[in-house]
Amino acid sequence: MTQNLRVKSSEFIDETNRISFKFDGKTYYGFKGDTLASALIANNVHLVGRSFKYHRPRGIMTSGSEEPNAIVQVNPNSNITEPNARATEIEIYEGLEASSQNCWPSVNFDIGGINNFLAPLFPAGFYYKTFMWPKSFWEKYEFFIRHSAGLGKSPNTRDPDIYDHRNIHCDVLVVGAGISGILAAKNAAKNNFKTLLLDEKNELGGSTIFEANEDNKINHNSASEWLKKEINELKNIKNLEIKTRTSVAAYHQYNYLLARENLTDHLVKKDKKNKIRQRLLKIRAKKVILATGALERPLIFNNNDRPGIMLSSAIKKYSNFYGVACGTKNIFFTNNDSAYESALSLHNKGIKVEAIIDIRENSDAKIIKKINDAGIKIYWSHTIVDTRGYKRLSGVSIMKLSNDGTSVIGSKISISCNCLGIAGGWTPAVHLYTQSGSKLTFDEERKIFIPKTDTKEQISVGSCGGDFELDEIITNLNYKLKNFLDINKTDFEGITLENDHETSKRNIWLLPSDQTIGKTKPFVDYQNDATAKDIKLALREGFRSIEHVKRYTTTGMGTDQGKLGNMHALGIIADIAGVKMGELGTTTFRPPYTPLTFGTIVGRNVGEFFDTFRRTPMNDWHIKNKAEFENVGQWKRSWYYPKEDETMHQAVQRESKAARQSAGILDASTLGKIDIQGSDASEFLNRVYTNAWSKLAIGKCRYGLMLNEDGMVYDDGVTTRLGENHYIMTTTTGGAANVLGKLEDYLQTEWPELDVYLTSVTDHFATASLCGPNSKKILNKIIPDLDLSDDIFPHMSFKEVLIDKIKCRIMRISFTGELSYEINAPASYGEAIWQKCIEAGKEFNITPYGTETMHLLRAEKGFIIVGQDTDGTMTPIDLQMDWIVSKKKYDFIGKRSLYRSDTMKEDRKQLVGLLTEDPNIVLEEGAQIISELNQKPVEMLGHVTSSYFSPNLNKSIALAVVKDGKNMMGRKLFVPMENKNISVIVANTVFYDEKNERLNA
Amino acid sequence: MFLINCPYCGERDQQEFKAGGEAHIERPKHPTELSDDEWAEYLFMRKNIKGVQFERWNHAHGCRKWFNMARDTSNDEIKAIYKMGEKPPTQ
Ligand SMILES: [Zn+2]
């Protein structure tokens, strides 16, 4: 295939390095340095996709990240496929494959194109109005919509690439390496600021670098030659780090920016291997200089979206930078002088320019004479009223504009062409500026939003700051830099500048046609297919806020965030509403400026590194003994220990029986442990727990319930008094960090007078919990010297002992209702102590059990699990735990709330036991509970919170919260499931050993 | 992402901190003597203003100390940071 549109050799393209690539299955050739877009245009391919709603043929429109149309699927049919990539940003490499998106079966014959002819049926808000009614039809509509619309396909296997994050701290960050950014970075670095310069392109120099306007001169040289010398000097500057192919995605408060550095996307497959693909830079800069440039505006006229219609500046870049002609017969359509530069660039390279259509009456810029000398016809005061050509532009029709610009007059002239450059003026790229929280101001005369303020920490320079002409760019940059960096002099002060000045202006947001608005298609948002008509309709239907119009019409809601058409949308609204654009406000630009891959966002935090996890000291033993693990908070806890081919149910039933019949052992190391010391420790516990603590003797343990200030149960656990001023508190596994945080909060802010010190010791101790009637015998084998008699070592007491010279704390406490001892050993001896228990327990068939069995055993006893049987709406009274709430204490956290009218209500949801009428049916946790079967709407009384089959009782048991449950003992209720209603009887929460006789068995 | 100047540690990234709601709401000394409305005022009512707001912050992944911050909620400008027990700045 010939690249018949290469017009000249370009210094940025390596013509000795020919590259083959595939687009839509067909092989093409380009050169090193090409983007997919420039290479396709060189092969005369403009049609690259279909539009979202009407499936209209669309072509490449821009040369940068603002591209709305040329959105492609990279490496289709592979596990590294990437949707929504802009062809204008993809650097080609040998073996690159890409395909069109949003078209089926092919870009040339697209079945959805029929929507274009059905366009009258697809007005603004169509999706809201039609597909939402009747509701039951949504699934049918959805099928149709999903198949005919959508942008690209996501990969369906794991991303094999490596991504990375890097933190960067710098004195000065410069975003954008056009002429302003380069001069700013150079001067910052030379003045000893640690400087970082970023640009999204692979070459420095922005648009000046391929500038060919002979009227723009710096020190009597062409601006591009002068800038190339400046760029060459950058290499020798200390303190300056430059990153190309790096686009800033987000600019947050306090100069915190996120940028994506693209490292290997432009490399051939073998060079990508084992390398980091993209890196997220997390930058905290003391000062930020925004030099993000400006985006050219399109013009909004009838059928302004055909392949071959491009931004004038893009046509210039393709010819001057890539050496590619976008068309063989070109027309420019403009409201300013910049299109003349593009036209002249083409003309000087021998590319035919048929005409320039200018909506202005005249211009006295110097370049006009050159255009006249070149013999290019200029149509002043004219507008395009229509275009022709389905898959490629073939011509335009133009007419004279009326004086007020609202209509066209005279006769229609038809001109044929295959490329149309449109130039609607420039929009400063203020996206990052506004993301930072800074405010814009509207310049009514120039019709642009510009930064309102520069600060000590941030300035905008060059065209993103509203300076477009060379002399004002350099002069203002010089002035701003000196202030911002607090330096006396820049090194480009005093250079001589020559350039043309634009004096004539005319702006019409929506250009008129000889056809009425209902018959025309002037696209405002190309990617989302929103036309000026849609905006008018939205206003007619009463939408006024720009944010509402935007959502209703979907203008600016595409992956390009409407970078091209947003200003026109605003302008059209302002015109219709009869208000000034400045009063209308602008929409908010949200991060990311250009889309980020998920890979970049998560970096290395994938797979096992997704979240941190914690393992107990006995972890290796659990793995060796084939434990299944459960995530509890960040902990990996043993869930159950299946033997041979046991199911989970079988294992849990076996473990539960063993723990009650002989002996079981549980790894309880994950429980939160807080060491509490200080002369006011007892008083502190009095204030944070609902029960009284002052009289707890040294060496004794007590269960405590902790509330929030709103009276709701927050956490629970056993606390042991180790000494006069020394306690150790245990918390739930998941609540440990929050409890410590809450206690610290009260200590530091409400009760700073208390002498109390809190230390988290969760990780310092390993805990083996021995349980069952034989646990005493096992412990006796391990510590023969210790008197385990109930008088000396009773339930709810503590002993400090030595086991093989290891200092251990043993608490005789029970969460199962069985005789039980918790051995706390220093973490590093945890596995040794555990092993010792297992050895000593062998003759009693000691059975390790996991969290599931623990949950079952405690449910048999009706012990709650905070967070499972409670959900932040349960008071201790609701839990039928009135016994633990001190009536005598003057105050504790949450006390007052227990006497609020709402918490005092008799018929609140309360914790009860449930027994199924059929003892073999196990309820589902979370299932709803009702009292009437035929009531509509049925009243939901509550739900099941815990449910198990108890092997020790040989029946199903459950805990539930039920409205007015306390008064429902013995009543029959129902648990409605999909196919049946299960009858249940309200019961006591304690199902097993109600008299607690087994604690001393 | 704020840059917060912990009064004990210095400037640190916001990631290290936890916000703790409105500041200078003192827990009543005698809760049992309060009416339901008075208790509710303490328990639930928060100003949530647009403008300079006084709030509590905790250097949760640092020194674990609580401190106060005056922050303009309209632009996230941190006007002042001061220790627990200190009076809020008047300006
Ligand atoms: Zn700190």
Image (cartoon, coloured by chain):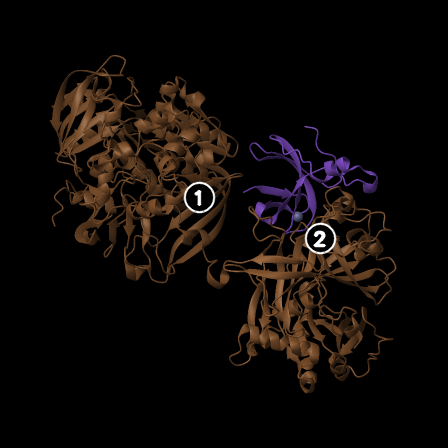
Q: Which chain is purple?
A: B
Callout 2 crowding tier (Cα within 10 Å): few <14, some 14–19, many ≥20 = many
Q: Which residue is mark 1?
A: A196
Q: Quadrant of residue A699?
A: bottom right
Q: Is residue A506 left or right of residue A949?
A: left
Q: Residue furthest top?
A: A403
Q: Residue at x 64, y 68 (%)?
A: A856
Q: Residue at x 71, y 64 (%)?
A: A862
Q: Look at the numbered disc 1 and say if its residue's Cβ is closer than 8 Å to ligand 1.
A: no
Label 2 amino acid? Answer: Val
Q: Secondary structure at mark 2?
A: strand
Q: Residue furthest bottom?
A: A843
Is residue A919 in view? yes
What shade does chain A have?
brown
Q: Quadrant of residue A402?
A: top left
Q: Which residue is mark 2?
A: A713
Q: Is residue A887 left or right of residue A600?
A: right
